[in-house]
Image: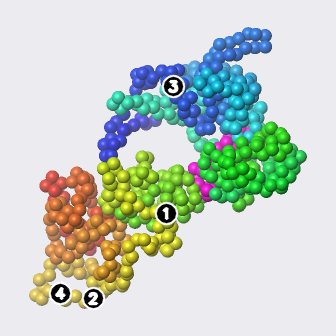
Amino acid sequence: MGQDLVYLVEGSSATPAVRVSLAEAGLKEREDLQEWVVAHPEVIADGVRVITIEYDRWSTGSGTSARQRLDVLGLDRAGRLVVVELKRERDRDIHLQALTYAALVSRFTIATLASVHADFLSRRGQPTSPDEAMAYLRDHVEGDFDAELLVNPRIVLLAADHPPQVVTAVDWLCTVSGHRLSIELRTMSAWRVGDQIAVQFDSMYPVVGIDDMLMSPTEANATTTTVAEKTTEATRAANTVQRIIDNGLLAIGAPLNLQPTTEIPADTRAAIEAWVAEEPSRGRAAWTADSAGPLRWEGDGNTWRPTTLIRHIIKQASGLDRGGRGPAWWITEAGSDLTALAYGRNTRDWTDLHQLMEQLHPGEWTNYGELAQIIAVPAISVGQHIATCPECPYGAHRILTSTGKPAGGFRWTDPTIAQTCQEVLTDEGVTFDPDGRANPNQKISAAALQQRRKLGNIPSQNAPTMQLSVALDRADLLLPLPIGGTSSACGSRELSRRRQSGRRRLEPLPDSPEPRRRAGSFAVAKYDPLTDFLERYEQCEIRMSFQRIEEVLGARLPASARSDRTWWGNTFNRTRVQAHAWLNAGWKVDAVDVTRESVTFIRGQS
């Protein structure tokens, strides 16, 4: 396994972090690590609520007691307890201790859980009664508590590292139990950069997402639901909302209709149907794409989690205090329930986003919120799709945050690009203030992008109007050669090149305020003067100082032009818009001297 490398990045500067032990970093197991887990339970797993810490009250019916201290006890949204064992360093017996704790907590009842959770919250400054704690737990779990799941807790072992004997034992236990035992190995590592400490959490076992990739034979005659199947079903229900949000599978405002499932008795379903018939708005909701309250229920206008709302509906309609797998009760217009939508073959068609990205021109920018507004998905979903989609059109760097700054996690899909997002935008003509915020006057609104898309890539009405006409390329004309054969060899090659590649092209009329754009080019207005200058230059070679180029451009060159020779490379890479200026004019860079700040252009060979 390769060594992890961590860097603190500030622009083009990257400072390596030094890996240290938690002890060397001065971090303690109970005072620090345990409190991190309480404050950020996502380091254990998604959707975990901490029930208590340092629980040590165990006894038998005859009064025999034990004082073994459980580090952290959590509850996931599927209704399974989560036993967490923490070690600041590696420990070869960590799994043995955790197995003991798992056996002990399997004896918990729902009432005991509520009592323990109320005590935990009260000790931490939030006075809570057992009944209030019970309500918190029921709201947290997707569906009703299942006794078979409650007695089969998950185990999470979190340590600086896990020795081979622990990994081997865990894999064997999971395998021979038919994966009824769920044991996860997680690691944490500390890194020092200057006087700061960063902590990284990783999943070691099992491989995250592997279950979604492996296929097994289906048992055609299976008639009972196993604990493993119940676990899978409960976990899917718990993760449904986040999967829909992350993948943008449902538009904000999408209507949903209530359809009770067969998990409740027929008489209860009939009571719900009658209750909804009295006031049809009780059976309707709209999708908000907010994980805290993804449904806006027409019954009261408030936002709800699916399962919490189902419990409320059941109680109102029938008087029963029980829940259900909420996401399975809500049906889309296409006839799919939310869980089927999240885990089926349904994936969002992002063509609308791709079309909008294509409308962003060099020298312009927008933000994630503007795009999200048009296609009716959360801004975070837009960002996640762009970050992972291999088919997104070029231009992701032109989509900034709401503050006008590049997203902190922005990465080029082409690893060979060394420039930062801001440097490329600057080359394209976007200006930034001293705090790194893009010029708001260069921002394109959602309405303008939508208009461009409707008009098929024609600029919207609030953009400068471009008058187009068909102009004859020089290759369409018979040009007289100089008398006496005084034309240079490069001049003959240039004429031949233009004849071979001649074609009609659209150009602005002379009175158009829009700068000339060349077919197939991503060059922007900033570098157009250099293109025009080189096209008019009659010799085969020219040496220009950086200062002279800036005079031609009427603007300063970016700092990278004076420090990075690759900035002057002859490439049609879409981020190197400056190179398009000379390549489109039929020239190329022959030599560059960043020390003397000069560059030599020669006419390109045909």
Front position among marks 3 and 2: 3
Residue 93 visible in the snapshot: yes
Q: Give the magenta-colored segment's residue range.
A: 230-252
Residue at image location 67% in from the left, 55% down from the top:
286
Q: Amino acid at mark 1?
A: Ala
What is the secondary structure assignment of the residue under circle 4? Answer: loop
Q: Which mark is residue 481?
A: 4
In the shown orientation, is residue 417 left or right of residue 149? left
Mark 1 and mark 4 lie on one chain; the one further toward the N terminus is: 1
Front position among marks 1 and 4: 1
> Which residue reaches farthest front?
300
Q: Which mark is residue 33?
A: 3
What is the secondary structure assignment of the residue under circle 3? Answer: helix
Q: Is residue 248 magenta?
A: yes
Between the C-alphas of marks 1 and 2, the distance is 44 Å
Mark 1 and mark 3 lie on one chain; the one further toward the N terminus is: 3
